[in-house]
Image: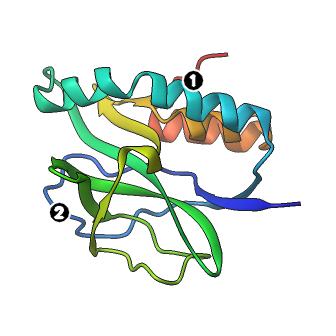
Amino acid sequence: MMKFALMLLPLFSGLSYAAEKIADKHQMVNVQDKNMAMAMEKARSTLDSFLAMSRNPPAGATGFKLKVMMSDDNGVEHFWMSPFKEVNSGFAGILANEPKVVKSVEWGKFYVFKREQISDWGYERDGKQMGSFTVCALFKSMPKDEVARYKKDYGFTCES
């Protein structure tokens, strides 16, 4: 059964560079997980709207980030890139998570990636986490008390 690694906590608000690692929870997910597949599809189908908003952020919106799939001989892992920017070849950003599976990348380094590698997006607005669909998908299999803590501490407002 194939699995990939997904970083849970996408907090990286308002910084112009990756000054510190995101304190996230590393979670392995089956590649056939239906909730995760739906979350990634939702993120990809709304990516253009997110990118347009990130170019001209509304008041109170900070911490724009993209979750990007990367792989090497060790496996597949999804990382938050924050900050990120659009470039001629696609996108570029600073890796904001400590790799656990993929060993060919390093936290805090600048990487170029393609649109097809994007699996999620997120930002914070007025204390609420927006987007972060893959994080919300993980909540469906986590203990309820842990989910409640994430929602309270970090402002997640996941759709049902």
Q: Is mark 1 on a helix, strand or loop?
A: loop
Q: Name the residue under label 1.
A: 158
Image point 69% across, 41% down: which residue?
A: 138
x 13%, y 21%: residue: 59
Residue drawn where x is 51% and y is 51% of the image = 9
* Residue displayed at 27% across by 41% down: 64
Packing grade of label 2 (10 A; few <14, some 14-19, many >=20) is: some
Nearer-N-terminus badge (1/2): 2
The residue that mark 2 highlights is 17
Left or right side of 128 for 84: left
Is 106 on the left-hand or right-hand side of 60? right
Quadrant occupied by the N terminus: bottom right
**Looking at the image, residue 147 lies above or below residue 18:** above
Q: Which of the numbered marks, if any, corresponds to residue 36?
A: none
Residue 136 percent coordinates (x, y): 61, 33
Q: Observer-nearest residue: 137 or 111?
A: 111
Percent across and percent down for residue 24 are 52, 60
Local crowd size for mark 1, using a 10 Å CA cut-off: few (<14), some (14–19), many (≥20): some
Query: What's the distance in space between the residues labelled 1 and 2, CA to CA?
Result: 27 Å
Above/below status of 134 relative to 44: below
Q: Position of residue 11 (x, y in %)?
A: 39, 49
Numbered disc 2: secondary structure:
loop
